[in-house]
Image (cartoon, rainbow, N blue to C red):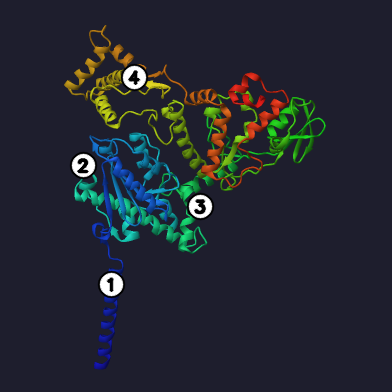
Amino acid sequence: MEFSNLNVSLTSAAVLLGCAGLTYWFYYKNKLRDASNAFKYLTIKVVTNETLCNEVILELKRRCQSHHAIGFDCEWVTEHGKRNPVALLQLSSFDGYCGLIRLNQLKYVPESLKELLEDKTIYKVGLAPSDDARYLHQDYGVVTEGTLDLRHIAHLVGHKVGGLGALSQSLLGVVLDKSWRIRCSDWEAEDLSTRQVRYASADAHVAIKMFVRLVNDLNKNNRWLSTKRNGEIWDNLDKFCWQYCDIRFKTNKMDRQGKNDSNKVKQLKKKDKELVSSKRYPHAVRSRPLYHNCFLQAPDGDLLCTCDDRKAMWYVEKQIADVVKDDPLTVRLRFEPSGRANGSVGAYYKLTKENKCVVCGAGNIYIRKNVVPREYRKYFPEVMKEHSSHDVVPLCVPCHQRSNISDQAVRERLADKCSAPLDVKRSAKYAEDVTCKCNISDQAVRERLADKCSAPLDVKRSAKYAEDVTCKKIRSAARALLLQSKKHVLPEERRKKLEAVLLDHYKEHAKITEELLAEASEIQVMFENSDYESHGQKVVEYFVAHGGLLQLEQMWREHFLQTMRPQHMPELWSVRHNEERLRIRLSEGRLPKEDMKLIGITGWLT
């Protein structure tokens, strides 16, 4: 019995020792470290002048060649619920070189920094970096490209997506200083405190550290690259990262997108109804094929082009064509067309085309993409608007989103180049007037004065409709008084102030009446802006005066190829398609001379 008890005691002791050993190993293996201790090796440069900024940017470019990325973050001050211009921009390389650029003291973005931010081959990694990019654009007019939200990659790897602090702990075992006292501290102070410097540099550096860790984890899991050699991994990084560039991360967006697409397909089958794009819903998701690949023939049987089935049957219904074959639908014209399909241009229109995303090859659900946006093409001469199907291609929903975001950067550059302010409501990525180039410190004063004096800043010519702030106050006062007359909730002092607003405007009235309140509560607030000028029209006018519209058209096509890298474009699709088509028309004497200057082909006659 004693021997048995001894065995039990020894076994229990062994178990306890084993558990203690495992606990000891687990604790030290996964011990969390404070950021100030974990990142002691950082080389931090606080930049307050252009000369030092140029040196720091040059060094960052040299050090980020291996990983093609830098940690990226911004800090600013919020006063009375309103964000001040970005005060500090933090950039960090993987080996610990950090540049803290004090934009509030520089007052502008130096050219070297601007080039780095606009370089899409160097990824600016962080959490919600596209938001920081938007603020930099609003405050300093610089368009930051190549932002990459770490949560995209963390989601693919299978990590629980959270804030920067949570990801830092789970991926690196590093605890960041996220006290509200430091996060909300004075980033516009004359000199930053030691704690501020450590906090700002750690936020940028931890981002690039997590990026490298996540990409290496992806490779280990064979999720995207088959190669195992580290050099090849980072040399081919662009093949994976470009699809998440400048895309905002949304929680569970992948699952939600899949459910939305699935539900749309089910609804289509249940109702036997097709979702098609229309003038009212230009970006509606389609399940109906974009390409029907019906054949249209000349009277002698020569193939002219492929076309939509409705267009083919229109000729038949008008009794100017006959159906010669049902599958595939083939229609032969009864009249001689104005021109025949010649050369590679004509061959393009004869090709059958696949109904799938031209970028990634996804099928079933897609959206029509206008490679040359309609806001410009609608101002083209008719001869250039003909056969516009060349520039309408199908994209799946995610690719369409990425393409629209990349298009916005081109719109902004055109707005600057052509003095054509973007419509405020059309601006998808940035909501500010990109033509405003005033000094940032002056602009901050203007905004404070606008609030203090109830004097809204001019929207210039960027909004088609303008809101009258005075009328809005009158309407608001009248509606408040109408409401209080029923419920008696307004204090006497407040009621008198509202009545004073109305009587100051309606000077012919001696007192407030029900009729006056009814009239004032429906006063017009929005007015058409007589100074409004369409961005698209201004851009078209600029190119007409500076070389012709073919340049603008070809610029958009090149942009689409460079940013989206389509793998499934229709055969013979060409950047110079319209130029070749118009040359044929000119040789046949079918190109009006008044259009030649607009198009930019006057030199073809010599």
Disc 2 on helix, strand or loop? loop
Residue at label 4?
A: 468
User: Gap between marks 3 and 1, in whole Å?
Assistant: 42 Å
Taking depth in this image into account, of 134 and 21 the one nearest to the observer is: 134
Disc nearest the viewer among 4 and 2: 2
Residue 192 position in % (x across, y down):
20, 45
Cβ atoms under marks 4 and 1 closer than 8 Å:
no
* CA neighbours of label 1 inside 10 A, class few (<14), some (14 to 19), many (20+): few
Q: Does residue 220 sit above or below 121 in this rendering?
A: below
Residue at label 2?
A: 186
Q: Earlier in the sequence, mark 1 or mark 2?
A: 1
Q: Does residue 501 sit above or below 362 in this rendering?
A: above
Residue at label 3?
A: 239
* Residue 570: image tag: none
Q: Quadrant of the N terminus?
A: bottom left
Amino acid bearing label 4: Asp
Cβ atoms under marks 4 and 2 closer than 8 Å:
no
User: Gap between marks 3 and 4, in whole Å?
Assistant: 50 Å
Amino acid bearing label 2: Asp
